[in-house]
Every structure is written in structure tokens, then in C-alpha cells.
Amino acid sequence: MSEPLSTPLSTESTAFRSALEVIRAVEPRIADAIGQEVADQREMLKLIASENYASPATLLAMGNWFSDKYAEGTVGRRFYAGCRNVDTVEALAAEHARELFGAEHAYAQPHSGIDANLVAFWAVLAQRVEAPALERAGVRNVNDLSEADWAELRQAFGNQRMLGMSLDAGGHLTHGFRPNISGKMFDQRSYGTDPVTGLIDYEALRVTAREFKPMIIVAGYSAYPRLVNFRFMREIADEVGATLMVDMAHFAGLVAGKVLTGDFDPVPHAQIVTTTTHKSLRGPRGGMVLCDESLADQVDRGCPMVLGGPLPHVMAAKAVALAEARRPEFRDYARAVVDNARSLAEGLMRRGATLVTGGTDNHLNLIDVASSYGLTGRQAESALLDSGIVTNRNAIPADPNGAWYTSGIRIGTPALTTRGLGATEMDEIAGLIDRVLTTTEPGTTKKGAPSKAQHILDPKIADEISHRATDLLTGFPLYPEIDLG
Ligand code: PLP
């Protein structure tokens, strides 16, 4: 009798198993941590709006010899020798980005979203502050300025104005807030949302822009569940002579997947667009800048302006992920992300939860857990985590609990949509979230005083929900093609 044939391993399984073996031979604890991370990600109900699961091809593109290469400069114009393969990678990443987003120019080097924003800010400052100063002085390079002219230029860099979305309305720290370098560089003012509708108040924004006269208006958000009309934003920017910069870090996948088009696609409207590549776009951790031709040269000076040597291995992975995002399936994915966010919103509201703005048009929802469940964001986040549901707390407009404890929970659908969950599962997840939050109570400090951090949840309920979450996910395995043994 012949031996039963064993199922051959997938190419992906072989690749990842071999990689882990090689790592294990040097530092087994790192191999274990990698294996444990996959196991945890497989079991978690991941609802963090800024996370996703990159494909095996994207992950594998990062682990190779490109990591060893220095390549300061840009394609064909490097400060180091031997960069022809890095040139191939960077040119391909930029080409895919231009084609995918319809951009005139793409810069794939930023190591993260914060770096992409810094490149963009300094590109605008170089165009609007430095270039005229060089022209006035009749020189081509800052090194040729006199000490007095250089001192004056440095003052001028620090005296520019920026208008960005307020943090509690959903803006990001890198949009001019004091704890971040952007708030130290610019004189910043914020625009917010209408207190009744929760939507961006464009007329109020226009009034602030007329009065404040910013050099840069920043649009884009981390926690705003609705669409932004970038045509309106550009009109306002043009009226006051500002450059419109859009940070699409959160919703780049929806732009790539053509869910956000026309007035809601930032690329045709903004002079400069920044993004991360690892959120709804489903690529490796990293950043990118898109811009029109007028800013291309300045953007390409991101290194050495604010970046060191590029990460060619990550640019390789960006190229792979962008190639994936150009496939027709990515459009179905992006549509499903938004449909799922809507199903989640409906499920939550039907069960009595209050959502900021009363719903969603994108990939995220913001639950007002203070008014819905009498909890702080911190208490709700911990209770959900006890129950196998990973979310993050987030401020809501005019948040009475401040930015640390908060009154909101942000939930997003990019990751679970990648695993294939749909409307039925979203409704069940809404039920699980609601059950956890209705049964959780605010806790007290050790001395018995009310605490915004502590929560009380019956461990039996947490266990029951956790098991249900894991059961639900077994129907939607993460990386089904990968068996790590
Ligand atoms: N911009 C926005 C709108 C973000 O939400 C984030 C991250 O949360 C960033 C920038 C910063 O991205 P990174 O963490 O890659 O620096």
C-alpha cells in the first residue's frame, strides 16, 4: 500500500516557515515573538481604524538586501554609488502611486506619516519662503546667503501660519499642535465642526481663513467619520492665498479604491497630498507625498531636508502594495470597507448607541460612550479589550473628559474587511460591543473614589464575548494560505 500523500505546503507557508527557522537559529525569542504576533492577530477582533493586514507579498518584499543599501538622493541622482536597483524600486513605487492616484508627482521615501507631513510642510516653506528669499538675495543656494540674510530667513520660516482641523474634531497632532514639531514650527489655528451636526463647518472655516490668512490649510483627519469636500477647501485656500495640503493617511485606501471621487478625492484639488501606506491602503508601514509639478522639486528634497537615507526595502514593499491596490479587487475591498462601517453604525445605533455625527460615510465610527453608556473612553477601551475586541479611545468634539480619558471609542473596518467579514458579522460585532459596554460600570480608585480609568466588568461576560469573537473569526482565517506549523 502506498503512503497517503500529505497536502503540499503553500509557497507562502514555505517562505515564512523558512524565514522563522533562519531567525530562530540566531535569536529564538524573536522567532517566538513573531509567531506569537501572528497568532494574536489571528485571534483578535481588530477594530483599530488605522490598522490593517498587509499581504504576504508586501511583507516578504520588506525582508531582504535592500535594507543594507544607502541611497540618499532621488532616482538617478544619488549621493551614493551602486544604487541602480534602488532606483528601479523607487521609480516603480512612484509610478504605481502616480497611476493609482492620478497624481502629477509622487515621492515614496517618507518613513512614516509624520515624515510625509514634515516633507510637505518644508516643501511649501521652501517654495513660498525660501525661494523668494534666495531670489531677492540673487543667490541659488542657502549656503550662499549672508549671515544677516540667513538670520532673516530663519525668522521668516518660524513666522508662518497654518490652519488645521482641531484635535477633538478629529484632526491629527501633526497638523500644527504644540506637542508635535509642526506646532512649534507654525503659528497654528484650528477649524472645527458644527456643534449640532458634527460636520465640518465650511463657512466658519472660510471666516477663520479670511481673518487668519494662513500660508497652509491642512485638511484630513484621524477620527472624522464623514466625507470632506476638498473642492470647497481648495476654493477657501485660493481665496486667502493658502496652499491646500491634504493628509489622507486614514482614507488613502478609499481614494485608491475609487470610493472617494470628485469633490471627495483630494488629489485633483490639493497642491500637496500626504499619506501613510499602512492604514486603509494595506501596505507596509511608511509614508508618501503626492503633489503637482510646481512642488515636485521641493518635495524631492525631503532627503536631506527632514529625512536621512531612504528605506529601499520598505519602498519595495510600497511598490508591491500599490500594484495590488491597482487591481480591480481593491475597488471591491474599498467599497466593502465603507459598507461594513455603515453596517456597524446601524447595528450600534439600533441598539441605542450614540455615534458622533449620527453615522459614517467612510471607514470609521466614533461612539460617544459617555452619553451612550456612562463610561469614559479609557474604561470602554479596557472593557472591550478584556472581551477580545481591540479598539482605541478617542476624543469627541468638546470632550468633557479631555484627550487622555476621552469620551469616545473609535472603531474602523479596514482590517476585518481584509479578512472577509461582511454586513452580518458587523451586526453581530455591534451586538458584542453593545453587550460589553452596557454591562460595564465605571470603577473606583483603591481608596474608593470615582476613577476615570478603572472599570468593572463581570469576567464571565468578558470571557463569553471573547470566545464568541474568536469563534466568529474562525470562519475568516487570517492568511489562510499560511500554515506556520
Ligand atoms: N496623519 C494622520 C491623519 C494620521 O492618522 C497618522 C497616524 O495615526 C499620521 C499622520 C502619522 O502616521 P505615522 O504613525 O506613520 O507617523
Image (tube, rainbow, N blue to C red):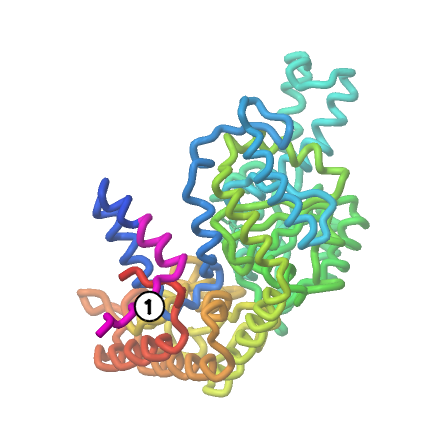
Q: In x, y percent, where is residue 222? A: 53, 58
| Residue at which label 1 appears | 7
Residue 436 against residue 118 in the figure, above or below: below
In which image quadrant can residue 146 be found?
A: top right
Residue 78 against residue 398 in the figure, above or below: above
Residue 213 appears in the rendering: no
Residue 55 magenta: no
Residue 312 against residue 59 in the figure, above or below: above
Q: Between residues 387 and 235, which one lies in front from this camera angle?
A: 387
Residue at image position (35%, 55%) is: 14
Q: In x, y percent, where is residue 402? A: 44, 60
Residue at image position (72%, 49%) is: 103
**Residue that protrudes farthest toward the bottom in the picture:** 350
Q: In x, y percent, where is residue 30? A: 26, 47
Please provide the residue range marked out in magenta.
Answer: 1-19
Residue 4 magenta: yes
